[in-house]
Amino acid sequence: MEQQAAGAYPYVIEMLHITKEFPGIKANDDITLQLKRGEIHALLGENGAGKSTLMSVLFGLYQPEKGEIKKDGKVVEIRDPNDATALNIGMVHQHFKLIEVFTVLDNIILGAEDTKLGFLQKKEARKKVKALSEKYGLRIDMDAKVEDITVGMQQRVEILKMLYRDNEILIFDEPTAVLTPQEIEELMQIMRNLKAEGKSILFISHKLNEIMEVSDRVTVLRKGKYIGTVETKDTNKEELSRMMVGRPVQLVVEKDEAHPKESVLEIKGLSVASKLHKNDAVKNVSLTVHAGEIVCIAGIDGNGQTEFVHALTGLEKASAGSITLCGKDITKASIRKRSLTGMSHIPEDRHKHGMVLDFTLEQNMVLQRYFEPEFQDHGFIKFGAIREYTDGLIEKFDIRSGQGPVTKARSMSGGNQQKAIVARELDRNMPLVVAVQPTRGLDVGAIEYIHSQLVKQRDEGKAVLLVSLELEEVMNLSDRILVMYEGEIVGELDPKTTTTSELGLYMAGAKRQDKEGKAE
Amino acid sequence: MKLRKFLNKDGTKSVLSTLISILIGLLVGAILILIVGLVDSKLGLKEAWKGIRLIFLGLFSKGQQAGRLVFGFNSTNIGDMLFRAVPIIMTGLSVSLAYKTGLFNIGASGQYLAGTTATLFIALKMNTAVVAPWIVWILAFFGGILAGALWGAIPGILKAFLNINEVLACIMTNWLAANIVTWMFEGSGLQCTEGTKTQVIWKTSHNGVATAKMGLDKLFPGSQQIDGGIIVAILIAILVYILLTKTTLGFELKACGSNRHAARYAGIRDKRSIVLSMALAGALAGAGAALYWLSGTTEFHWQTYLSLPSEGFTGIAVALLGSCNPIGNIFTGMFMSTLNVAGSKLSFFTEYNEYITDVIIAVIVYLSAFSLLIKMWLTKRFKKSEDRRIPDVVYTSNNRPGDEPAPAHENKGKEGSDK
């Protein structure tokens, strides 16, 4: 009876007029989200728009000040994650919650184990997992340890965890942030399979391409407010991005022809030893970056890009080769020397390298400059000058935070942290800008902004070395593409004449050029 | 409104949480005294009441008259309290400085011993007939600082270059120091031969070296021990505060302590910073030892190989209780030595032994670790009434605090409906 009644009701989960406040900010302000049975519903919004807060409310991690949650039309109270689990709500977090040294199967059954007299009964579980994985096309190796499998497979394990618990409502929190293009394609297919089997999916993302491809409806949030819900088939990327950002957004970078001038950075025969295996992580890499051009190093994650950048910026030692910056040999120079010689570095990992999270914004803004006469006098910090400088950067680069210059960096949203780092690095006005995945995990508004800043740097005659994993970014932004595969530069491509699939072949190691630049 | 603003300040909350920790600690101590008093047939309720009053007011005890405790201003007690506060303020500063720069210095005891040794050797071995005593004092003082710094640098070097946990390295250097110091004094010929005392080293005043009183003996008449050491300690605390909050060096050390990778990325020499932090921490502990022994009023028991000086560990309590704030350490150090004075009064005027104050100190140390929790609880309490008052404003370039609140965002659904 009850089952039938529930089946007739179109919405499986409804979050009505949810308001959640934090000191100083309304994270959710009267937000309504209705998830239909058997649909893929995308939740779109910039960083800090309130998506995570809303999901935390759904999971019982936060209690809203106002509003109610309905399951199958009945008001339910979700006080903690156990309540959410009992309502068959499951979630794949952006950062997986797996135990690395356990096997895939053990991870899936963890917390829902069958036992007999206190002993684990894995046989039934194994059968069930196998059936599920075949039904939904979730390829896994049940006996491999999680630490040994790829990120893509880890994600499939997370999905199986939800399915194993018979969850009906599946939440994917930024699921594609960590995946390669091929894995993203596969995930989209999996989501379609899940939908075909009657599961309801909430898909949190700010990647418009994926939302357009896979979702049925889209709910857009902005700055904690509900902007609207639209049918995907009735909308387009431009409209969605306008709803999300609140103004028209340039989705393709606008830039003129590059006018490369003198060479700024010259690298010859650079090799870097690997920490993981005996082979070099970077093998005999030579390249030149000129003033007024954006050179992009493309490649799949883990092909030596990180080690290459570390050797270039001084975080790691090179085992062979030479680096010349602005005519000076910096192969053995200290990090500070390199930075002062003329290098800005937007680091790959903004939490590990980019910021001291327990410092305030203003302290972070002078992380490389506190010793300059502008900011210190006989070893004493000039607090006034730092405040003024930070205020200037906040204004110029539109960095948003709760308390301005004295905001703890930790409490800022990811996008604004990245904006702050970009502001700091670009404002130093150095001839070479090394930008490593500068838009990782950011929303369209912030991406547009950072891209335009990098192009501006180029036009001002800076040399920009961009390292990126995003094909779109590589194709859009660069003037020259160097593809790195297994620590080597395997090809130089012109973004104007090459195609994404061509680039993909080089990235996958299926194709390479010889010394003269001819394809082999 | 002003009061609320004041209460919401981070510093206010730290101080409040410290005071609450202390109060709970004292109450627990009082309960303990009561229980012991009721259980022990020697004591009883009357004795317990005496004990409780002494725990709270020991500093102001003026002795007994006809079996009744008399309280009032007692300059001897206060002078002694200030003197005993000197070494633990300094070890507290040592722990605080390390903590603020991301390190846990549990090696203050060893650094204190290193400082003790250098100070006593210089102060007692130099011929004061040739070199003026005040020069010897200065040499001994800086000798103690240097020895502490070198001893502190060892765990720093191990941490920076070999990634060995500083806590482990500190524990080992503590006991190394304890044994080396015993060995060095054993063959030093500095043992006191006066009177019936054994196993102690001469006071530095034996060689005519002693810290100037700086008029404090006039201010606190009756105290044999008070000298200018407390003034030096307070000055050093202020210097440490300035170093940590106002200088580029402090910025570097804190950045490195907070995120070593980011500091390195920014071009700060992380290894140097770690070694320097530990060396500075060691120097402070060494300075504490120097100030204590150079007073010339106490003798050093040189057989330290069986137990470490308690100053190092009391320093941890002083630091934690003061939220690792150098200025706060001055007060928490004084509070700890107040308890010390109260303890000696307790054993003097009642049948209790003074170790009960150690129990109270232990409770307070535990609570000082909880003071963070208490602080969070306070934050929550203050927030409750605050929440409704804070306008919904995000700080951007166009809207600064003090400006008008930002206009409300567009109506919901507007964007969705205008397609």
Image: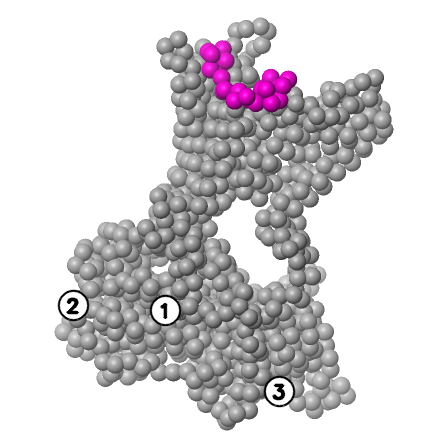
Q: Main secondary structure of the magenta part?
A: loop
Question: In the shown orientation, is residue B254 left or right of residue B15?
Answer: left
CA separation, marks 2 and 1?
25 Å
Asked whether residue B218 is drawn in magenta, I would say yes
Q: Which residue is mark 1?
A: A437
Range shown magenta: B204-227
The residue at the point 61 percent across, 82 percent down is: A33
Nearer to us in this view, A398 or A16: A398
Relative horizontal placement of residue B159, taking residue B197 as reference (left or right): left
User: Is A218 inside the magenta-drawn segment?
Assistant: no
Q: Position of residue B381 (x, y in %)?
A: 69, 56
Residue behind mark 3: A36
Q: Quadrant of residue A9?
A: bottom right
Alpha-carbon span between mark 3 and mark 2: 59 Å
| Above-or-below relation of A148 to B321 | below
Mark carried by residue A262: 2
Q: Is the residue at mark 1 from the same chain as the one at mark 3?
A: yes
What residue sits 52% from the left and 6% below the top?
B193
Crowdedness near tag 1: few (<14), some (14–19) or many (≥20) residues, C-alpha within 10 Å? some
